[in-house]
Image (cartoon, helix red, strand yellow):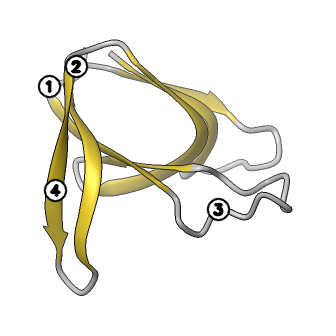
Amino acid sequence: MNAELEVLIRFNTNYNQEDPHSKEWRVIVNGVEKLCNTVDIECSSKTSKNFIEGVGFKWHIQCNASELIFEKDGHYDDETHFSKITIC
């Protein structure tokens, strides 16, 4: 099991519903962005407003997780794009 992970979730404003490979959600784990279509949250969460340098304010669902489960997307073979992320 991992140490506590800070997770921020927000809608991907670059999501293109016409592109079947576009991802709806940004999931930022300890500052590293992942993209996915489905997010399951199985731990306590809250909303937050965060200032991001060079971007401005963004609104998130925020969790402190002990584990993340990543389900691969068959179209991508990388550590950025997933079909589903479960936050425990």
Which amino acid type corresponds to the residue marked 2 in the rendered image? Answer: Ser
Q: CA distance from mark 4 to mark 2?
A: 22 Å
Q: Quadrant of residue 54?
A: bottom left
Which amino acid type corresponds to the residue marked 4 in the rendered image? Answer: Lys
Instruction: Please state the horizontal and vertical placement of residue 36, each as a whole percent of the image.
Output: 59, 43
Asked whether disc 3 touches disc 2, contact meaning CB atoms under 8 Å apart, the reply is no
Q: Of marks 3 and 2, which one's residue comes earlier in the chain?
A: 3
Considering depth in this image, is 51 or 78 the residue closer to the camera?
Answer: 51
- Position of the C terminus by quadrant: top left
Q: Of marks 3 and 4, which one's residue comes earlier in the chain?
A: 3
Instruction: Please state the horizontal and vertical placement of residue 9, each as a whole percent of the image.
Output: 36, 44
Determine crowd level at label 2: few under 14, some 14-19, many 20+ residues with C-alpha closer than 10 A. some
Determine crowd level at label 3: few under 14, some 14-19, many 20+ residues with C-alpha closer than 10 A. some
Q: Of marks 1 and 2, which one's residue comes earlier in the chain?
A: 1
Q: Which residue is mark 1?
A: 3
Q: CA distance from mark 1 to mark 2?
A: 6 Å
Which amino acid type corresponds to the residue marked 1 in the rendered image? Answer: Ala
Asked whether disc 3 touches disc 4, contact meaning CB atoms under 8 Å apart, the reply is no
SS for callout 4: strand
Instruction: Please state the horizontal and vertical placement of residue 20, each as a whole percent of the image.
Output: 85, 52
Q: Of marks 1 and 3, which one's residue comes earlier in the chain?
A: 1
Which of label 1 and label 3 is nearer to you?
3
Q: Which residue is mark 2?
A: 66
Q: Which residue is mark 4?
A: 49
Q: Of marks 1 and 4, which one's residue comes earlier in the chain?
A: 1
Asked whether disc 1 touches disc 2, contact meaning CB atoms under 8 Å apart, the reply is yes
Name the residue at 65% across, 52% down: 23
Q: Which residue is mark 3?
A: 15
Name the residue at 72% across, 57% down: 22
